Amino acid sequence: MIYLDNHATTPCDPRVAEQMMPWLVEHFGNPHSTSHEMGRQAKSAIDTSLGVIASRLGIAADSVLITSGATESNNLAIDGICRHPRQRRRHVVTSTIEHPAVLDVVARLEKDGFRVTRVPVHANDHQLAGQIDLDQLAATIDDDTALVSVHWANNEIGVIQPMESIAEIAHRSGALFHSDATQAVGRIDVDLKRVDVDLISASAHKFYGPKGVGLLTIAGGMAARRVRLKPMIVGGGQQRNLRSGTMSPANVIAMATALELAITESALVAERVSQMRSQLWNGLVQGIDGISSNGPPANPSRRLVGNLNCRLPGIEGESWMAACSDVAFSSGSACSSVDAKPSHVLTGLGLSESEARRSVRFGIGKFNTPDQIDRAIDLLVAGYQNLTR
Ligand code: PMP
């Protein structure tokens, strides 16, 4: 199996897994039981890792909250801000192409009486394809807007959003700015000293860490605005009463290690991955007449370098996937593949439902090799030919 689905998840880097093991088996103390040495040892390891994560993101250590992943972080950020008892503002703004872990949270707020605006993105044939329409964003924000939530980079078409401009517009009216940075952290520069975002969400398994652990940063960025969050998970109050539950030293250490590796190796990885992305695209163009690309141009400031989203003439993505069972890729996003609707990201780009159904997503990662890409091209082209012959 050739794995080309690195936006859905990445394999845990063996160097990361190795760091986890002693904290699972040997040093298993509860980091919140600090009355004895084993607990204090676990707490100290967590504190060190939080420091690493925070400094890599450009914030203070007490601005990082550990969660079970980006889904929880998005829920906590959006619901937590809007449902806080002292929140007076009743308007939430997001984009049409967010992950369901944002869209479903705002939809529930809408049902509960909040006003929600979903700002469209530029169409596929526009030079800013996939980027949020900043004029429409500016026009919708007012002094009732509590929160603007726009992802940093998209999981299907890899588009990178104009973060500085969104931040400036959101803050004009005193709204907070949250960004689902799940596809960005560890892949591109996410420096909260440089970009004025109040909260970001991420999941370790997107940057070669384990699944089931993620983070939410809170107001640790440039301006350090006041963020009041209503907690979702209550109990022992372990993380400053914002998120209860025993923290896992192994997971936190793993996330810190994975983040450090991803950031220190990012330039090298980006160069390799970007070459393999061109190799894959060129191979598909040669083998499949009429194949086209969805989303922004392959420019590293506009699109995640490992992302390729393409549209086939004549056949559905699902059929192509079934015909190429030795290559792992996806139609739409893995997280919404349970429902048969065409991708809202692609229809949000202005594609028709039929075009969206004829589209697939590839995500190339650091463990792929040029030889694997060559083999994948052969399998993908042969699979396509079998279906269209
Ligand atoms: N946001 C984005 C942009 C994602 O790509 C994903 C994972 N597909 C998530 C949120 C949810 O992450 P998790 O499933 O780890 O909670």
Image: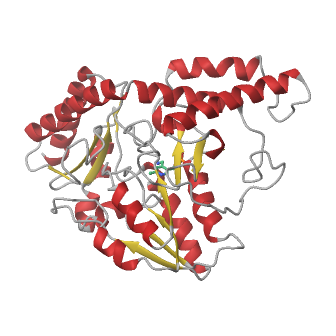
Image-based side of 314 in relation to 317, left or right: left
Q: Give residue 86's position: percent from left, percent from top.
A: 70, 73
Q: Could you say which is closer to the camera, residue 146 or residue 112?
A: 146
What residue is rendered at 37% in x and 52% in y? 154
Q: Give residue 385's position: percent from left, percent from top.
A: 15, 41
Asked if residue 248 can be seen in this view, the reply is: yes
Asked if residue 64 can be seen in this view, the reply is: no
Q: In which quarter of the image is residue 165?
A: bottom left
Residue farthest along the right direction in this orientation:
35
Q: Could you say which is closer to the camera, residue 169 or residue 25?
A: 169
Image-based side of 372 in relation to 151, left or right: left
Q: Give residue 185's position: percent from left, percent from top.
A: 45, 41
Q: Could you say which is closer to the camera, residue 224 or residue 205?
A: 224
Image-based side of 72 in relation to 376, left or right: right
Image-based side of 264 in relation to 300, left or right: right
Residue 165, compared with residue 183, is above or below; it is below
Q: Quadrant of the N terminus?
A: top left
Residue 236, compared with residue 109, is above or below; it is above
What residue is rendered at 15% in x and 62% in y? 125
Q: Give residue 21's position: percent from left, percent from top.
A: 66, 19
Q: Could you say which is closer to the camera, residue 384 or residue 330?
A: 330
What residue is rendered at 29% in x and 66% in y? 121
What residue is rendered at 21% in x and 59% in y? 128
Residue 155, compared with residue 9, is above or below; it is below
Q: Quadrant of residue 75?
A: bottom right
Residue 280, compared with residue 197, is above or below; it is above
